[in-house]
Image (cartoon, rainbow, N blue to C red):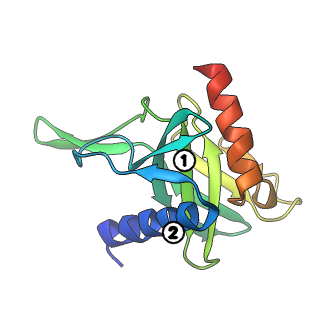
Amino acid sequence: MITKKKGLIAEAMFLSKCVELGINIFLPYEEKQYYDYIVDFNNKLLRISCKSGRIEGNSIVASVGSVCYRNGKYCRQADSNLDVYSVYVPQLKNLYLIPYSKGLSKIDIRMSLNDTNRSKRLNRRSQDHEFTLELFTQIAIICTHIA
């Protein structure tokens, strides 16, 4: 499947989940933003970037950051204007939420507790990041205290 289509599916799944949970969601007018959606949650606007994840071994992996084209070359740049990553994994038909972290280039979510050989990436347990209203509330509170 082509990258653009994977991204559109990830965005559609996030939109669907927000509607299901009663979360107010808005689309940015311009397409070339670092974020895909803006969510109004408890009077806090959160910028969300939707990513498509994949399974590698016992982990869910997703590349983060944006690809840009400068001086005839493709480059990857950090998404500094974000609050939350939403990662959709088609094989699992599930969404995961990860708060933005400066300098992060790849998300690594462990699907089992015995996989500890990924020290160069951010390790997280999948069940702790499944998209629920409770998790979204916790992330919104964290983002409110950071801003």
Residue designated by label 2: 16
Three-letter code for the amino acid on which mark 2 is drawn: Ser
For this orientation, the residue located farthest to the right is: 114
Image quadrant holding the C terminus, namely: top right
Q: Quadrant of residue 138?
A: top right
Q: Considering the numbered disc 1 on the image, is that residue within a helix, a strand or a loop?
A: strand
Image quadrant holding the N terminus, namely: bottom left
Q: In the rendered structure, which disc, 2 or 1, sits on the residue that comes first in sequence?
A: 2
Judging depth in this view, the residue of 5 and 45 nearest the camera is 45
The residue positioned 11% from the left and 35% from the top of the image is 71
Q: How many callouts does the rendering have?
A: 2
Three-letter code for the amino acid on which mark 1 is drawn: Tyr
Q: Is residue 139 left or right of residue 36?
A: right
Judging depth in this view, the residue of 98 and 24 nearest the camera is 24
Judging depth in this view, the residue of 10 and 114 nearest the camera is 10
Relative to 81, say whether 112 is above or below.
below
Answer few, some or many: residues within 10 Å of disc 1's Cα (few below 14, many 20 plus, some between 14 and 19).
Answer: many
Q: Considering the numbered disc 2 on the image, is that residue within a helix, a strand or a loop?
A: helix
Residue 75 shows in this picture: yes
Q: Residue 13: which disc? A: none
Q: Nearer the viewer, mark 2 or mark 1?
A: 2
Q: Is residue 115 left or right of residue 121?
A: right
Residue designated by label 1: 85
Relative to 86, say whether 88 is above or below.
below
- The image position of residue 13, as x and y in percent, is 50, 69
For this orientation, the residue located farthest to the left is: 72
Q: Quadrant of residue 56?
A: bottom right
The residue positioned 73% from the left and 47% from the top of the image is 123
Residue 53 shows in this picture: no
The residue positioned 36% from the left and 67% from the top of the image is 8
- The image position of residue 31, as x and y in percent, is 23, 49
